[in-house]
Amino acid sequence: MTKILKIGELGKLSKKLNKENKKVVLCHGVFDLVHLGHVNYFKSSKEYGDILVVSVTKGKFVNKGINRPYNTDGDRVEYLTSLKLIDYVVLNDKPTSVNIIKALKPNIYAKGPDYKNIKKDITGEIKNEIKAVRSIKGKVIFTDDRSLSSSKILNNLDNSFNNSQKIFLKSLKSKFNFNYINYYLEKIKSLKVSVVGEIIVDKYIFCDTVGKSGKEPHLVLKDLYEEKYLGGVGAIANNLSLFCEKLKLISYVGKLNTQSKFINKNLNSNILKHLIVKKNSPTIEKKRFIDNISKSKIIGVYNVNENNLDKFEEKKFNAIIKKSLSNSDLFIISDYGHGLINSTTAKILTTKKKFIALNAQLNAFNIGYHTLAKYNFINFLIINENELRHELRDRSSKVEILIEKLNKNIKIDNLVITRGRNGAVYYSRKNRSKIYCPAFANNVLDKVGAGDAMLSVMSLLCKVGCDPRISIFLGSLAAAQNVENLNNSSPLDKTKLLQYVNYMLK
């Protein structure tokens, strides 16, 4: 009978089998839905030795899209124990098999035919696993079985995706594959990108809600702990730096409380910073008090000086912008309406013949004052539906009408309207086409930063001419990844994003 092992037992098993001169073969994977391809993989692998050990990836490390893994950790392990081919099963508590290899010291590490071309491994972890096998003087083999896919089977199950998601994915699969996406991701790498906007330090203070004050009509909270995240254009720059090699960040820090040490520590190393100092101002800090149980926001306290830059600061800031415009392929603006980008700066940005991407956000400080009207031409704009309604002073018209209205006011080549759980709409002015993409978020925890994540991915793809259907798909997945974490506590993971895309298109 197949035995379930704990990781701590692998070393003892290795010594025992070595003394018995038993040749050990290790297979590793998710094994979410075991099919004939897996069985053949196990058969072929065991031909290389006497004992077959199968390690299973824990569900929290599986990055294969919505509702994956389909089966629980326990169910996947239990199913494998029913196969007579397998001698031992172990549930791995790490994202790769390197720790299992080093503990078990198998003679053979067997991978399926899908992994023969190491260059196609999105994670890059196969190289590390091969290195680990060589370090214990083992051998790596690749089986020649017919390749089948659990993801393809699960993607066709009724409960894997809702109806709108299935229709959208079906249309993508009929026209595109992962090689198409990889082609455009390679083109993105060489782009010279500049991003401008306000850096925001987001502070989340986690509390227990004690109740109403005994003497006064206000809520009392017990402060438990706090976390700080780099937000605003800082988060956008970090996201962009995962995809392109050359990146400039143009922003400001406050003279009163610069928080420069925190900003420098949390910005990726390949980002070139151009930060002016704003007098009589702090670096923008937005505090949110969070209920520790539900993780819902209770109240926000913002430390912001929303006054425009003074004449000297504006002149210095605009000089940096002009210089950056001359040597950038793509200029991304994230305008939070806190006094950094005035109409003069906006005119400089949008009158040069450069590809301009814009995200102009509505918030508690700028309602009634912030508008897109200061921008006269935009190549790519992403805007939330509620923000668009506010911009046009239109509460009830259909989104299609809003698109027509906005395009009469501002020339926009490519427009994306995000609609929360209703997904997003992509409008192309060139052929007046509309693409409706469903939302892919499974568990929405915090919407802060979702638009920024979408902007980061889509602006790059739009610039290099990627098909809008793929662009909005990847952008929606980036937004989905973001909203499943608090604020920017878990930055956009490029590898995870590409794994999602790869498996969802099967």
Image (cartoon, rainbow, N blue to C red):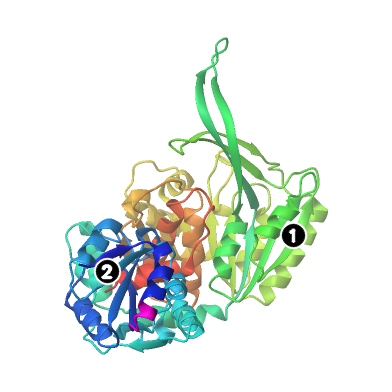
Left or right, 261 with reference to 452: right
Is label 1 in a helix, a strand or a loop?
A: strand
* Whether residue 305 can be seen here: yes
| Residue type for callout 2 | Phe
Question: Between residues 75 and 223, which one lies in front from this camera angle?
Answer: 75
Q: Nearer the viewer, residue 456 or 398?
A: 456
Label 1 crowd (10 A; few <14 / some 14-19 / many >=20): some
Residue 205: mark in rendering: none
Residue at numbered disc 2: 31
The residue at 42%/76% (across/down) is: 466
Query: What secondary structure is found at the residue carrying circle 2?
Result: loop
Q: What residue do we see at 50% from left, 74% from top?
A: 463
Q: Earlier in the sequence, mark 2 or mark 1?
A: 2
**Figure quadrant of the C terminus:** bottom left
Which region of the structure is painted magenta? 17-22
Query: On the image, numbered disc 1 is attached to which residue?
Result: 275
Judge whether residue 365 can be spotted in this image: no
Give 131 or 165, whichever is nearer the viewer.
131
Q: How many marks?
A: 2
